[in-house]
């Protein structure tokens, strides 16, 4: 048991004050009745059972008052539960060449739009993360169900020189491992609970080599889906970008595409597997505290109704008091 807003528990210090006030009120009530009425002339108070009902009702009212601070403190139980989840890491090229406008309005905005369409089409239970890469790869958002967080990161993509394609794939693998979706190791990439979607306009030229990153993805059974943006021929001393991106996809069990159509993006999670992941959860019990308070108040009201209907008594356990007989006249 834990409390998410424990400061409210200080209000429970008022409960002993309420108990003292209730005891004082009960005693004062009895003194007042004896002071203003003579039990030999008229009956006062209720019988023993009625007084017991009243005291129980008063105790229930105090318990109900105590439930208020407890509910505000938000009691909760920390548990874990198994969920079948898949995760996709979006890897977006933020090199300066992504400013070219052969795709409208430019390559980077085309990648951003494709990523947002992917978020629209992805299953609700799929975790999505974001890594950007230029001279280095940076994980902007770890795999999460929080779609607005990913969209906010997509709106702010800094750009620099370089294309660390291999480093981006390795960073994506690390994020997927951290999300717990790569254990146990699946028999085939198609049964993996993890995916990496790379959107780039060029071949890798800094950081971890794309070939090394491809081998690591194959070892982890993680398919890498690649999308070629633009039509850059690349450098003469390196493989053409389409060739490098296609090799990365085919060798890991992914798919290579040169468009960013919704159909291409949907293919990424068409056969996405699911890993049984231990997900920490917090179950709040504030509603139970409020329910206890309502039940206590209802029981207290019912008891007070019974007290009002019981006969008046002049002493503990006595029936209705009778006035003393008057002496005969004359």
Image (cartoon, rainbow, N blue to C red):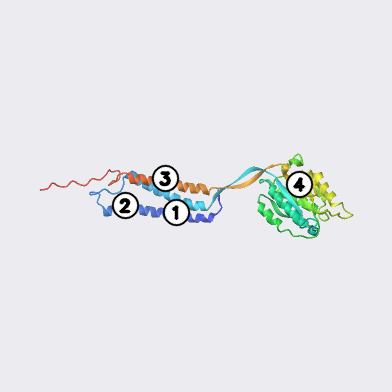
- Percent position (x, y) of residue 226? 79, 49
Query: Label 3, on which residue?
Result: 299
How many other residues sit within 10 Å of disc 2, few (<14), some (14-19) or many (≥20)? few
Q: Which residue is mark 1?
A: 15
Mark 4 crowd level (few <14, some 14–19, many ≥20, 10 Å Cα): some
Q: Position of residue 219 (x, y in %)?
A: 78, 44
Give the quarter of the image for residue 158. bottom right
> Is the Cβ of the residue at disc 1 closer than 8 Å to that at disc 4?
no
- Quarter of the figure with residue 188: top right
Query: Mark 3–mark 2 contact, CB under 8 Å?
Result: no
* Residue of label 2: 30
Sequence-first tag of 4 and 2: 2
Separation of disc 1 and disc 3 at Cα? Answer: 19 Å
Residue furthest right in the image: 236
Q: Which mark is residue 264?
A: 4
- Crowdedness near tag 1: few (<14), some (14–19) or many (≥20) residues, C-alpha within 10 Å: some
In this rendering, position of residue 113 left or right of residue 19? right
Helix, strand or loop for disc 4: helix
Between the C-alphas of marks 2 and 1, the distance is: 23 Å
């Amino acid at each position: 048991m834990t409390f998410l807003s424990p400061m409210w528990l200080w209000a429970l210090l008022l409960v002993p004050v309420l108990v003292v006030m209730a005891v004082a009120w009960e005693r004062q009530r009895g003194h007042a009745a004896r002071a203003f009425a003579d039990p030999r002339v008229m009956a006062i108070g209720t019988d023993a059972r009625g007084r017991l009902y009243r005291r129980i009702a008063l105790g229930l009212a105090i318990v109900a008052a105590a439930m208020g601070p407890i509910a505000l403190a938000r009691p909760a139980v920390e548990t874990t539960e198994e969920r079948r989840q898949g995760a996709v890491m979006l890897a977006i090229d933020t090199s300066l060449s992504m400013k070219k406008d052969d795709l409208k309005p430019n390559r980077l905005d085309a990648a951003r739009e494709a990523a947002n369409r992917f978020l629209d089409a992805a299953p609700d239970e799929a975790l999505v993360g974001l890594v950007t890469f230029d001279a280095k790869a940076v994980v902007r958002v770890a795999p999460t169900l929080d779609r607005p967080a990913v969209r906010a990161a997509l709106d702010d993509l800094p750009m620099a020189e370089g294309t660390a394609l291999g480093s981006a794939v390795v960073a994506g693998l690390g994020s997927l491992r951290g999300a717990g979706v790569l254990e146990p190791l699946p028999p085939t990439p198609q049964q993996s609970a993890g995916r990496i979607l790379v959107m780039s306009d060029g071949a890798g030229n800094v950081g971890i080599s794309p070939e090394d990153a491809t081998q690591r993805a194959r070892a982890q059974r993680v398919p890498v889906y690649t999308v070629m943006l633009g039509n850059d021929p690349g450098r003469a001393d390196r493989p053409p970008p389409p060739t490098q991106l296609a090799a990365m996809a085919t060798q890991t069990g992914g798919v290579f595409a040169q468009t960013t159509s919704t159909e291409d993006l949907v293919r990424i999670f068409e056969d996405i597997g699911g890993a049984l992941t231990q997900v920490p959860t917090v179950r709040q019990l504030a509603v139970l505290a409020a329910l206890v308070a309502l039940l206590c108040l209802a029981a207290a009201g019912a008891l007070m109704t019974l007290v009002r209907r019981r006969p008046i008594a002049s002493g503990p356990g006595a029936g209705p008091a009778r006035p003393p007989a008057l002496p005969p006249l004359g």
